[in-house]
Image (tube, rainbow, N blue to C red):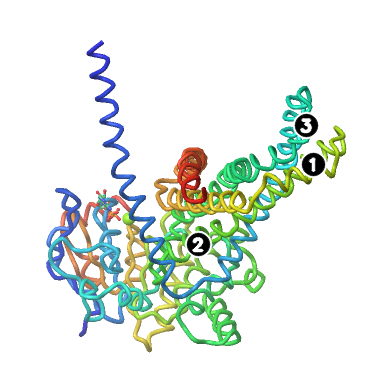
Amino acid sequence: MSYAIEFNHLTKRFGNHTVLDDLNFNIHEGKITTILGFSGAGKSTVLKHILGIYHPTEGQVKVLGQDMEKMNEGQIREFRTNFGMVFQYAALFDSMTNFENVAFPMKEFTNYTKEEIEEKAIGLMKQVGLDEFAFHKLPSEISGGMRKRVGLARALALQPKVMLYDEPTTGLDPITTHMVDDLITSTHNHNAHLPMTSVIISHDIAATLRISDYVAFLEKGKTVVHAPVEEFRKSDHPVIKKFIELST
Amino acid sequence: MIKLLKSSIEWLGRWVMSITPALGRFTLYAISNFQWFFRPPVRKRLFFEQMVFMGNKSLFIVFLTSSFSGAVFAYQIYLGFTAFSVDSFVGPIVAIAVVKELAPVFTGLVVAGRCGAAMAAQIGSMKVTEQIDALEVMGVNSIQYLGVPRVFATVVTMPMLTGVFMLVANAGSWLVGVKLLGIDEAIYFAKLGDFMNLNMLVEGLIKAAVFGYLISIIGTYQGFAVKGGAEGVGKGTNMAVVWGMIIVLIMDFFLTAILAKVLG
Ligand SMILES: Nc1ncnc2c1ncn2[C@@H]1O[C@H](COP(=O)(O)OP(=O)(O)O)[C@@H](O)[C@H]1O
Ligand SMILES: [Mg+2]
């Protein structure tokens, strides 16, 4: 089993506030892993280390076998095309149509022709189930659920090896939550040939149990448990029991 | 008395301490913006979009302010000068004031209010909705993508708008002076020719370009510096306008002094 992301004794302090405390676990390649925890546990901070936006105070993060701390700025920008990031509120560029949003990464980073980009962007929007009428509308003219789909299509544009989801279902109604969960799984399976690694940041226990292969539970900057989902479900760790209790 | 002095020095000290980090961040941003200007890819389309956007936002207001300020200025000068029968000087006096001062400063104030504010609002709302993060995560530098085209477009557009201001204000002055108040047209233009020179135009346009740079670098910085939600965007927009206008007025003094030395 190889690892897509490795945290080697990762510690992050802001001033003297230790947010990540000797974090030491690995994320399996080709699997869906959810990083779970109460708010303030340090989940987003972990995500920003994966993306190379934050820099470790101590320890090391390796993504696809590489340490971004050893790269220069240009290499980091290049390397980030390996990531597909889905933001909590989609973060679509509001001055562009949905189509232009999805085409944007290809325009920036590939030598595809205009026709190729158009074909691929439309293919991606169909893959995530976006209605055709929405293709050439502005993000502000479609629903939140639809925007999520566009954000997902945009994240997939450069065939990323690692998909990152920041709280994909927080604040959504139950039906849209299910839709997004299904979308995450189908995206993951659709790209199984890559193979794609999916990392989800969440505090939604039900969704986590439904779609994850692995769960890492973060508490005060440490991983309390990192286990396959079945094992996690049966965990008798008091904090996790409390978390499951509070969320159901 | 000493207590008052002490407390006001303390207040000043605290104020300096509180703006120093922001000033540092601002300087770093300005340097970074400058560096990214020279790095590929050149974003021509974004640059032209910004120019069109600025024109749309401010051309009409520049037109309005310039025509009326030229007209009213000519009127006032005429009223003062006609008593001494030197009303033929209305043309050059208005022209010199407009070209060297009024055009760049008024255009700067309009552009700070319209475009500097819009820059802070656009970039700020992109910041709070994570669109800036989205750019960065995709590997696109947000300063290069959003900051540089706006600054470059403003530096180029400000002299153009200022040129429009100069033309229209002088047309207003001519209309009031010659057509309304009856100054002899031939004399009006002869006096203009006697007193005007190219250096005045150069002075006005250089001021315009410098104001354009300052307004846009402040406007975009305030956008990137936005924190929090919609409230933060409002604050940033406000700061962009206030600081943009203050800087135009302060820098006008120093530029006048410097350019007087340089251009003679
Ligand atoms: N840039 C930063 N500067 C200072 N403190 C930070 C910064 N980013 C995160 N933190 C702190 O780290 C802690 C964890 O934050 P975060 O990773 O956002 O938690 P979560 O995403 O699990 O809710 C919080 O206490 C937060 O205040
Ligand atoms: Mg978070």
Nearest the viewer among A110 and B130 is: A110
Q: Is residue B47 left or right of residue B22?
A: right
Nearest the viewer among B204 and A104 is: B204
Q: Could you tell me which chain the residue with mark 2 belongs to?
A: A
Neighbourhood count class around disc 3 (C-alpha, 10 Å): few under 14, some 14–19, many 20 upward: many
Relative image position of residue B97 (x, y in whole percent): 64, 39
Query: In the rendered image, which residue does mark 3 sit on?
Result: B87
Q: Could you tell me which chain the residue with mark 3 belongs to?
A: B
Q: CA distance from mark 3 to mark 1?
A: 9 Å
Query: In the rendered image, which residue does mark 2 sit on?
Result: A176
Q: Report the disc number at residue B188.
A: 1
Residue at disc 2, secondary structure: helix
Relative image position of residue A5 (x, y in whole percent): 24, 75
Q: Is residue B175 left or right of residue B242?
A: right
Q: Please say if A16 is above or below A96.
A: above
Question: Which amino acid lies under the numbered mark 1 shown in the image of this protein?
Answer: Tyr
Q: Could you tell me which chain the residue with mark 1 belongs to?
A: B
Q: Between tags 2 and 3, which lies in front?
A: 3
In primary-sequence order, the first of circles 3 and 1 is 3
Neighbourhood count class around disc 2 (C-alpha, 10 Å): few under 14, some 14–19, many 20 upward: some
Q: Quadrant of ligand 2?
A: bottom left
